[in-house]
Image: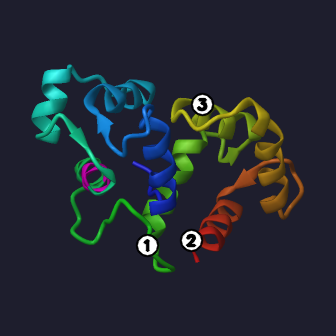
Amino acid sequence: MSPLTKNDLRRIFEKLDKNGDGLVSLDELNCLMERIGVQFSLEELESLVGMPCMGFDEFIFFYDSISNQTGGGDDEDKGIIDGDDGDQSDIAKAFKVFDLNGDGFISSEELESVLVRLGLWDERNGKDCRSMICYYDTNLDGMIDFEEFKNMMFHTIS
């Protein structure tokens, strides 16, 4: 699973919290899980989460627990990037999430597709994907390669 910052998780949490009550219900959480291709029944999800809804702190804990299950189980492998010492393997995993066709580059279309799956895409922000690609595209090929992605991630989280 790709590493996400607390700000990323806050944005996702706020998008999921449709009624603005500061809690994400299992239904709201299940919508996100289905969008990223993970299928749970509501009963399975409640068993996994252990409560009918969760606040932001519980959401972070849930994210960390599923990140560590899929990330190899290393105690030092945190799902959330907190500072400058982000693990190279986490960055590589994040890159693979966005590099949908596996060609070693992230296009603005791939970036948009991932944002759509996460429910973070807003039609008005279409130019933002291209702008972000252009901003970090140091070799001017119109796409982000791994080194550019790594520089972007370290710049973003520092």
Residue 70 disc label = none
* Residue type at the position of mark 2: Ile
Horizontal and vertical percent position of residue 102: 60, 39
Q: How is the image coloured?
A: rainbow
Mark 2, Cα crowd under 10 Å, few <14 / some 14-19 / many 20+, is some
Horizontal and vertical percent position of residue 29: 33, 33
Residue 157 disc label = 2
Q: Which secondary structure is most common in the magenta stretch?
A: helix
Horizontal and vertical percent position of residue 154: 60, 72
* Residue type at the position of mark 3: Val
Q: What residue do we see at 85% from left, 47% from top?
A: 142
What is the spatial separation of the Cα atoms under label 3 and label 2, in whole angstroms? 22 Å
What is the spatial separation of the Cα atoms under label 3 and label 1, in whole angstroms? 25 Å
- 59 drawn magenta: yes
Contact check, label 2 and label 1, Cβ < 8 Å: yes
> Which residues fall within the magenta stretch?
58-63
Which residue has dot 3 on it?
Answer: 116
